[in-house]
Image: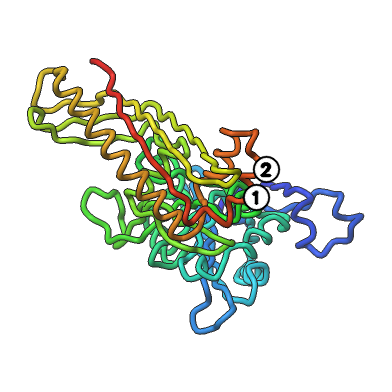
Amino acid sequence: MRVKKSAVLLLCAALLPLSGCSRAEAALPYAHEIEDTVLMGALGVDLEEGAPGGVAVTVSSGGRSGAGDSPGQSPVVLSAQAETVSAACAEMQTFGSDFVFFGDVEHVLVGEEQALTGVMSLLGHMARDPELRLEARLWVIKDGRAGDILFDAASDGGAPDRLTALETDAELAASPAPRTAREVLSDLLDNGCALLPALERRPARTGDGAEGEYTVAGAGYAILRNGALAGWTGEEGALGADLLTGDAPGRILEFAAPSLAQTALRLTEVKTELTPSFTDGVLAGLAVTCRIEAQVAELRGADGLSEEGRIWLEERLAQTGEVAIHTALDLAQTLDADYLHLGRKAALAAPWRKAELETQWKAGFAALPISLTVTGQVARM
């Protein structure tokens, strides 16, 4: 039920080009009744099915609260197909009497097929559009379509709330670290590669908190190379990437020690150093050293942590980190995609070799010998 009391929402002059006003008129605020405006919080972009080159754009609002005794309203989900994102969004304005406002979009989802064709056009549109913001979080849907995720979430209160929850989970190290569209665009322009958090659509299970048939969960990272999807890290590679990029502190790792039924470690700090080596002025290798520090978050099956148990945990922590980092590094070299920004970090580590390294890095990265040393430290209880 719509709110009976009328109020006015003043939208900024950025919205005025959509109204058809002249440049002089655009200096004035443009008013819409709040009851006639739907604030969209998530936008998804997919390839249009059966129409090569076209796009399918889906947008979703969050759940809308009622006023007084009026019940709340379900999320609004709209979808349109066109040759461009701009045209699809414009078409949505014709779907009803409500004004569709995209200035509140905080999450932008890209389906896998669309990501394979590239995201630079979408990022360019976001940079130029008067409503969409580059501060919005960007996600890639693994083995699925963005539109399906947004329609599924409508029964759970709307996609914006679910995506915001996943972003919060990332801060608690339960999901891949979120990235803004601005950060992704900057990485692609500067380095040609970028790392994006991946989501996947999964059947809902008891305890998921989902009311519908499906839910959405983190699925590691998507790797972009030259603006298009090149591969996926998987869970192990995602941990390795987080260790190398500094996003791992806070993550919980579980180990079953021989004398302890179950131990949970919380990562507290990761210290990584890169050292490039040269032979006769030619880049010959890269040494990566990583120290992972953790503290015991929980012990099950024992009253305390013995010194022997602590040493065992440190060895397992180092082994787990080494496997994860190796996975991330091997993937980067296999794809010839320096999504971890190793070249930039190596140049900072040896600034006197910066010119040589920058000249040789891109051509030699895929075959560059990389040595890795990982140590673990578990704080005494």
Which residue is pictured at 45% across the width and 43% down the height? Answer: 177
Q: Where is residue 26 in the image (x, y as percent from the top left)?
A: 85, 54
Give the image location of residue 324, x and y in percent. 33, 45
Q: Position of residue 21 (x, y in %)?
A: 85, 61
Q: Is residue 73 visible?
A: no
Foreground: 191 or 186?
191
Q: Name the residue under label 1.
A: 359
Q: What residue type is labelled 2?
A: Ala
Q: For the C terminus, which image quadrant?
A: top left
In the image, is residue 67 above or below residue 15?
A: above
Q: Quick check: 140 above or below 285?
A: below
Residue type at the position of mark 1 = Thr
Q: Is residue 243 left or right of residue 252?
A: right
Residue occupying the point 40% across, 27% down: 269
| Colouring rule applied to residues | rainbow
What is the number of the mark on residue 287?
none
Q: Which residue lies furthest to the top in this view?
A: 381
Question: What residue appears at the point 80 percent right and 48 percent down from the top-left corner?
Answer: 29
- Image-based side of 323 in relation to 27, left or right: left
| Residue furthest front in the image | 280
Q: Which mark is residue 355?
A: 2
Q: Residues within 10 Å of mark 1 (few under 14, many from 20)?
A: few
Q: In the rendered structure, are the residues bearing label 2 and label 1 in contact, judged by CB atoms less than 8 Å apart?
A: yes
Q: How far apart are marks 2 and 1 (CA)?
A: 6 Å
Determine whether the residue tagged by mark 1 lies in a helix, strand or loop. helix
